[in-house]
Amino acid sequence: MAASVGTIRAGIEPLVIAAGADLEDLQIQQAGRREIVRVFVDRDGGIDLDLVSELSRSISVLLDEEPLSSQFAGTFVLEVSSPGVDRPLTEPKHWRRAMDRLVEVELRDGTTVLGRITDVEGDVLSLEVTEGKSSISKSIPLSLVELGRVQVEFNRTTTEGAEDGH
């Protein structure tokens, strides 16, 4: 018997919310005689290791107790982490949390826009898009967006933090 994602989600989500985070995703995968329970959490300002550790301990206790423990036929391994940079941006909170990041935006009409998020106001995404040697601002209603992904930048230069020596 495989554990029910819906039942486990319903059991642990109040705990995640009480800790000030959002339950972004929950995956349960069979691995031999045990199941791997992957819990992805996030919040505005990001997730730190202290919160991941706290949630891991609390969720583990919940999963070891009835009624959730009866969801597992055998043992389970719990993994708690943030969704990571490759997570698709699908909700306004995802876009807001990627503020100032370079993103590739696939629009519903099949076109793609590459730009840096400068604002997310309601359901409108604002990007700074480089065209040639200049930058322009573009506002895109999120209703026109099919998918967005943060682009990894290894050599980004920024003036942020320059005044305080960082």
Image (cartoon, rainbow, N blue to C red):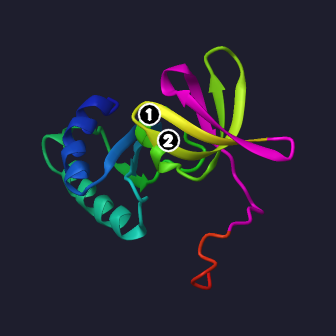
Q: Residue at x 43, y 36 (%)?
A: 92
Q: What residue did someone put label 2 on?
A: 95
Report the magenta residues as a range.
Answer: 131-158
Relative depth, front residue between 105 and 86: 105
The reply to whether the magenta stretch includes residue 86 is: no
Relative depth, front residue between 25 and 27: 25
- Element marked by disc 2: helix
Position of residue 48 relative to residue 15, above or below, is: below
Q: Quadrant of residue 26?
A: top left
Image quadrant occupied by the N terminus: top left
- Along the horizontal axis of the image, is 71 left or right of 144? left
Circle 2 Cα neighbour tier, 10 Å, few/some/many (<14 / 14–19 / ≥20): many
Position of residue 117 relative to residue 44, above or below, is: above
Return the x and y of residue 85 as percentages of the image width and height: 58, 49
Q: What residue did someone put label 1 on?
A: 91
Return the x and y of residue 57 as percentages of the image width and height: 28, 63
Marks 1 and 2: in contact by CB < 8 Å? yes
Q: Residue at x 70, y 32 (%)?
A: 113
